[in-house]
Image (cartoon, grey):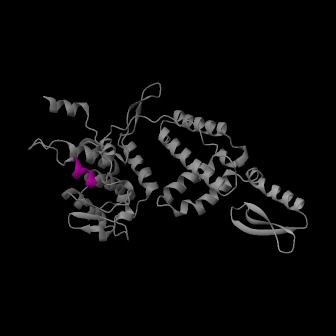
């Protein structure tokens, strides 16, 4: 942005801050003998963002966004992985001015077609919607820094996401996972694939979020309770997580691997899911489709461990007939502030409900 002012010497000065192609702000001032010359230069500056958007590629913008914006976020690692994937797409080679609403719609359609062509692909409507959200944030950053004037993601219809998942891990599923990774579940994991299964079992026992689980440090453990710092939680609220005997046993074996400072230090957000899917598919627990490529049975994923715990905790105790945990206690354990969101993790099947109606 720039402005014109009259100097004490009787000349006209155009001053302000100019955004360079790399996005940095540079202070400038320039004097002119006449007001007409000053106005002409000022008008040229106002056209700057349009000119810049025709020179900067989306890939270059993403590079800058990662440094200036993503690096400041708590979810920086996950977001950078998604942004780097976007950079590998042909969309990233285009200049900002050439990317329109139609361009984004074509990108969405192409991504969904990738899923249709490859059943084993990890692409889903939810995945594409997350990409679209990040892409919109990138363009908003560009607008704020006067690199472009338009966010082509605005008004784009998002792919419809399926209803919330119904999958939980049964005792049989867990036995298949253990067999597939060659671990008995009662000894020290020997490799990262077994460690990923150990982390999943710990999630089934505690209901902890995957991101929180991977941050567990030795100092958090206090006998049968985990003291989780606010900074390590999604909601930025400190909480205590109760540990069952089985959860403590899993921790004990993983701690013998002596990762520092995080107990599950051999895993991160990326390899956790990759390793778990490999074991899941080897165990025959992946998604199933019919001849028309329509999903007929959901595959098990790492995040289902959280729902497995919530469903078990809210189900009746065989001896008392009452839920193992009341709703408020369950919310404290899982870290849910919104009870409606907690409902999404309760996945008792129709057969289980039918047993209670007898």
The residue lying toward the viewer, choosing from 235 and 325, is: 235
Q: Quadrant of the N terminus?
A: bottom right
Residue that protrudes farthest toward the right in the picture: 33
Residue 122 location (% of width, % of height)? 48, 43
Residue 187 appearing in the image: no
Could you tell whether 117 is left or right of 60 in the image?
left
Q: Residue 109: where, in percent of width, then height? A: 59, 35
Residue 301 rendering spot, x and y as whole percentages: 38, 45
The span picked out in magenta is 327-333
> Is 328 contained in the magenta span?
yes
Which residue is depicted at the point 54% across and 46% down?
133
Can residue 247 be seen in this snapshot? yes
Where the C terminus falls, by quadrant? top left
The answer to whether 8 appears left or right of 194 in the picture is right
Q: Residue furthest bottom?
A: 9
Residue shown at the point (34%, 70%) measured from the top left: 258
Rendering coords of residue 292 (x, y %) = 47, 25
Closest to the observer: 27 or 188?
A: 27
| Residue furthest left as drawn | 319
Residue 25 found in image quarter = bottom right
Q: Residue 206 lies in what quarter of the image?
A: bottom left
Magenta segment main secondary structure:
helix
Q: Is residue 313 magenta?
A: no
Q: Which of the two residues, 149 or 233, is positioned nearer the viewer here?
A: 149
Q: Quadrant of residue 21?
A: bottom right
Q: Residue at x 65, y 53 (%)?
A: 143
């Amino acid at each position: 942005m720039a402005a014109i002012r009259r100097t004490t010497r009787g000349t006209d000065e155009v001053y302000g801050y100019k955004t360079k192609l790399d996005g940095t702000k540079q202070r400038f001032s320039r004097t002119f003998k006449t007001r007409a010359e000053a106005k002409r230069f000022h008008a040229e500056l106002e056209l700057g963002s349009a000119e810049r958007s025709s020179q900067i590629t989306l890939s270059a913008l993403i590079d800058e966004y990662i440094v200036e914006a993503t690096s400041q976020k708590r979810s920086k690692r996950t977001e950078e992985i998604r942004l780097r994937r976007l950079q590998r797409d042909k969309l990233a080679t285009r200049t900002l001015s050439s990317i329109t609403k139609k361009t984004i719609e074509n990108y969405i359609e192409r991504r969904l077609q990738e899923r249709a062509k490859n059943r084993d692909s990890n692409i889903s409507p939810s995945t594409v919607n997350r990409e679209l959200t990040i892409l919109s944030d990138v363009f908003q950053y560009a607008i704020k820094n006067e690199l472009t004037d338009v966010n082509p993601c605005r008004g784009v219809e998002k792919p419809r996401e399926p209803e919330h998942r119904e999958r939980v891990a049964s005792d049989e599923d867990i036995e298949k996972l253990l067999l597939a990774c060659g671990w008995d579940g009662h000894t020290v994991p020997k490799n990262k694939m077994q460690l990923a299964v150990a982390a999943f079992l710990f999630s089934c026992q505690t209901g902890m979020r995957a991101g929180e689980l991977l941050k567990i440090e030795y100092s958090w453990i206090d006998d049968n309770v985990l003291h989780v710092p606010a900074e390590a939680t999604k909601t930025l609220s400190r909480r205590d997580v109760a540990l069952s005997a089985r959860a403590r046993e899993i921790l004990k074996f993983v701690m013998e691997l002596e990762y520092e400072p995080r107990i599950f230090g051999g895993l991160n957000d990326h390899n956790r899911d990759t390793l778990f899917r490999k074991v899941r598919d080897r165990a025959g627990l992946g998604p199933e489709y019919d001849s028309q490529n329509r999903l007929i049975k959901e595959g098990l994923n790492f995040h289902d461990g959280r729902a497995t715990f919530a469903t078990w905790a809210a189900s009746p105790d065989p001896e008392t007939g009452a839920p193992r945990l009341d709703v408020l206690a369950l919310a404290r354990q899982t870290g849910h502030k919104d009870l409606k969101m907690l409902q999404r993790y309760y996945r008792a099947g129709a057969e289980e409900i039918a047993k209670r109606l007898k």
